[in-house]
Image: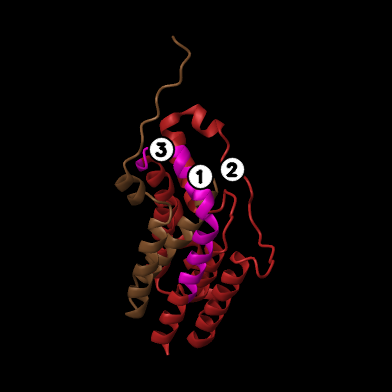
Chain colours: A red, B brown
Amino acid sequence: MVAGGLFSGVVLGLFSGLSTPLPASWRYTAIVAVALLGVLRDGGVVTIPLPQNARQVPQDVLRRSPGRGALRFGFELGTGVRTYVSATAPYVLAVAVLLGGQRPQVATLAGVGFGAGRAATPLLRRASGAVEGWDADLNARLRVITVAGSAALAVAFGLLFLHRL
Amino acid sequence: MTGQQPPVRPVPPLRRWATDPLGPVLLLTVSAMITAAYGHVLTWAVVGGLAGYTLSGSV
C-alpha cells in the first residue's frame, strides 16, 4: 500500500511543475479554498460530484497467487485510484500536491503517508481482536473521520500558507 | 461436531480503546497541527496519512 501511495504521489509531483508559473500565494490560496470546500462536501453541506474509478480490485488477483496477489492488491489499493473514494480528503491532497508539490520530497512524503494511512485500517482492524465489532465502530464513526480529516487538512494547509507569506 | 458456535472472547477494554477507529484521526490531526505550525515538510506525510485513513470505509 505504501508503494502504491508513493507511486501516486510521484506521478502527481511530476505534474506539479505545470503550476510552477503561478505565484506561491495564489497556489496556496487555491489549496486552502479547495480544502475548505472539501470540509463542506464531507459535512454534507454541498454536493459536488467528483470523478472516481469506482471499482474494487478483482478477487481473482488473490486467487491466482496469494503472495504476489496480496502485494498487487495492496499496491492498487494504495494508489487510491482503483477503489471507491468515499471521502474528499484524497482529492484535496491530490490538488495540494499538484499545486504545492514542486519540491520532490513533498510529493514523496504525501504519497508514502497516503499509503501508510490506507494500510492503517487493516492493521488496526486486525489488532482489535474483534473485527466485526471494529467494523461496527468504524461505520458509526465514519462521518466523524471524514469530516475531521478534511478539517485537519484545511487547517494544516492554512498554517503552511502562513509560513509561505 | 456439536454444531455450536465457538465462544466469542471478550476484547479487553484497553485493547478496544487503543484500536478505536478514531485513534489514528486524533493522532494524525494533532501531528498535522504541530508540524504545520512549524512549517515542517513532514506535514505532507501526516496530511497524506490522514487522507489515506479517511478512505477506511472503502476497499
Q: Position of residue A31 (x, y in %)?
A: 53, 77
At horizontal 39% and vertical 63% (from top left) the residue drawn is B26
The image position of residue A26, as x and y in percent, is 54, 86
**Residue where numbered disc 3 is placed:** A130
Q: Which residues are magenta?
A: A127-154
Tell me the tag on residue A99. Answer: none
Q: Check whether the beta carbons of the residues at disc 2 and disc 3 lie within 8 A of each other.
A: no
Under mark 2, the amino acid is Gln
Looking at the image, can residue A101 be seen? yes
Q: Name the residue that disc number 2 marks.
A: A56
Left or right placement of residue A53 versus residue B5 in this view: right
Q: What amino acid is labelled 3 in the image?
A: Ala
| Residue occupying the point 48% across, 85% down | A24
Residue drawn at x 46%, y 70% as measured from the top left: A152
For the residues labelled 1 and 2, the Cα–Cα distance comes to 21 Å
Residues at marks 3 and 1 on the same chain: yes
Label 3 secondary element: loop
* Crowd tier of the residue under label 3, counting other residues whose Cα lies within 10 Å: few below 14, some 14–19, many 20 or above: some
Is residue A28 a member of the stretch shown in magenta?
A: no
State how far apart marks 3 and 1 are (Cα): 10 Å
Provide the chain ID for the residue under circle 3.
A
Q: Residue at x 45, y 21 (%)?
A: B5
User: Which residue in the protein does label 1 denote?
Assistant: A136
Label 2 neighbourhood size at 10 Å, few (<14), some (14-19), many (20+)? some
Residue A62: give x, y in percent of width and height: 49, 32
Q: Are marks 1 and 2 on the same chain?
A: yes
As drawn, is B11 to the left or to the right of A155? left
Q: Chain of mark 1?
A: A
Whether labels 2 and 3 share one chain: yes
